[in-house]
Image (spheres, helix red, strand yellow):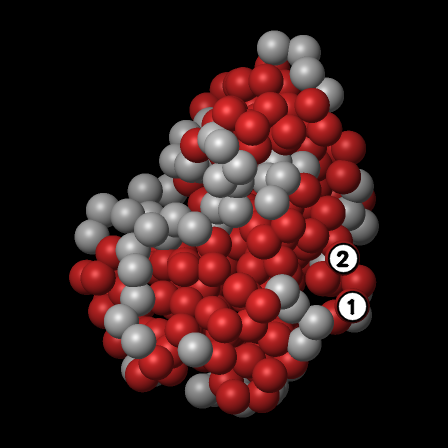
Amino acid sequence: MPEYDDHPVILGLKAGDTIGGPTVLAAVLAKSVIETGYYDPQLTADRYVDWWRVEGFDTGPVFALVMGARINGSTSEEAVLHAHETLGGLSAGCNPAHRAPALAVTLDADISELVEVVKADAALTHYDPLAGDVAATVAVLCRVLMEGASWAEAKLVAAEGRLPETVAAITEGGGSLPTAGGYAPEVLAAAVYFLDRYPPDVALAAAKAFAGGANFCPVLVGAIGGAMKLADI
């Protein structure tokens, strides 16, 4: 298996990331797992804060609010709730889905454990469970494709046990024109739309043209597309 920086999933993530924040934040997460050999939520949460304090950028409003509260002395739980309430309950952003491919690549765990870890990581910053549910879906898509599943098989596996909004994004998102916002189910639906229609490199180019300056769905298209390349799809 390729090293982290040379892994097709990570190379795809980087290719889809036109601004750079998701790439760096995923690397922060990956480094924590690689160094310890497992996922440590407290270590990871502290490293997110350390990164944000020094150079954090391009994370979306939810993550930014959580990090600001943490730096001002709030606990993780207090900061996450504060961000959720400040944004009027709109905390189902795609940031956790952007960093989830790092866990698909580095975490030595079966699918059920991978899902739980990805959700736990999402909960460090995003209160709405949809953020973690979509992130888990992205991680599962990457993992099962890495293991040789077809795209159709991967979508079926990834949809198992997910929330209705997430299932709709996987099963229905490919059938209608996507939207370009940062709401996690919409970002997933947009990624599925392009990956349903085109091979990975073409899908990424189409996603970038669609997204313009919005650094949302191309990150997922790149990462998932990298897993598809590994599976020779």
On the question of residue 137 being in view, the answer is yes
Residue identified by numbered label 2? 116
Q: Do callouts 1 and 2 mark residues in contact (Cβ within 8 Å)?
A: yes
Element at badge 1?
Answer: helix
Whole-angstrom CA distance, mark 1 to mark 2, is 6 Å
Q: On the rendered structure, is 15 left or right of 89?
A: left
The residue lying at 74 percent from left, 53 percent from top is 117
Q: On the rendered structure, is 39 left or right of 151?
A: right
Residue 222: horizontal and vertical position, in percent? 40, 64
Residue 57 picture quarter: top left
The residue lying at 62 percent from left, 58 percent from top is 133
Element at badge 2?
Answer: helix
Q: Which mark is residue 38?
A: none
- Amino acid at dot 1: Ser
**Quarter of the C terminus within the rendering:** bottom left
Is 56 above or below relative to 176? above
Residue 143 picture quarter: bottom right
- Amino acid at dot 2: Glu
Is 91 above or below relative to 177? above
Q: Total number of numbered labels?
A: 2
Residue 51: horizontal and vertical position, in percent? 55, 27
**Quarter of the N terminus within the rendering:** bottom right
Residue identified by numbered label 1? 112
Residue 28: horizontal and vertical position, in percent? 59, 39
Nearer to me, 148 or 208 = 208
